[in-house]
Amino acid sequence: MARRLLLGVSLAACVIGPAALAGADGGAAGPAPLELTRLSLDARGIRTVMDHHLPSLRACYERALVDGGRAGGKVMAQFTVGPRGTVTEASVEELGEGIRRPDVCRCLEQALTKMEFPRPADGEAQPVATPLILTAVE
């Protein structure tokens, strides 16, 4: 069976910046666990998991702002969800002018590898690609 590339999860609509988590609980204990068995490895399931992990993604971006940067831009996150739902590899690349912050991309890659997704229904590793917008809101 041919692998399918899940594209266009539209996380670009989820701005990773201070306003992205308005009203969300980003407490020290971390987010409550997701019930992955209730999700599918489709655009909606991937979005749910990524939304759940926005605090760790946002932390990568906020480090750049703390360092005095006004980093902002669009990146493409690409990762593979293995048969057990774990991320087996991840890469984040700048798009266009980008954020010009390789450290932020590396941090986002590390955050992605710590995420757990629903298991692929066919038991095969599934590549995923989604854009992320990084922006500061003053």
Image (spheres, helix red, strand yellow):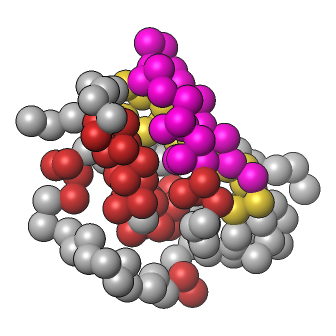
Residue extending farthest front: 67
Residue extending farthest right: 1
Residue 41 versus residue 80 in the image, above or below: below
Nearest the camera: 102 or 14? Answer: 102
Which residue appears at 26% of the width and 71% of the height? 26
Nearest the camera: 88 or 40? Answer: 88
Residue 109 versus residue 136 in the image, above or below: below
Nearest the camera: 106 or 37? Answer: 106
Which residue appears at 31% of the width and 45% of the height? 62
Relative to residue 120, is residue 43 drawn left or right? Answer: left
Q: Where is residue 119 in the image (x, y as percent from the top left)?
A: 69, 75
Residue 113 versus residue 67 in the image, above or below: below
Residue extending farthest top: 97
Segment colored magenta: 89-109
Residue 52 located within the stretch drawn in magenta: no
Relative to residue 62, is residue 23 drawn left or right? Answer: left
Q: Where is residue 87 in the image (x, y as percent from the top left)?
A: 69, 62
Residue 106 located within the stretch drawn in magenta: yes
Tell me the quadrant of the picture where the N terminus can be found.
bottom right
Quadrant location of residue 32?
bottom left
Which residue appears at 35% of the width and 62% of the height? 55
Quadrant location of residue 77?
top right
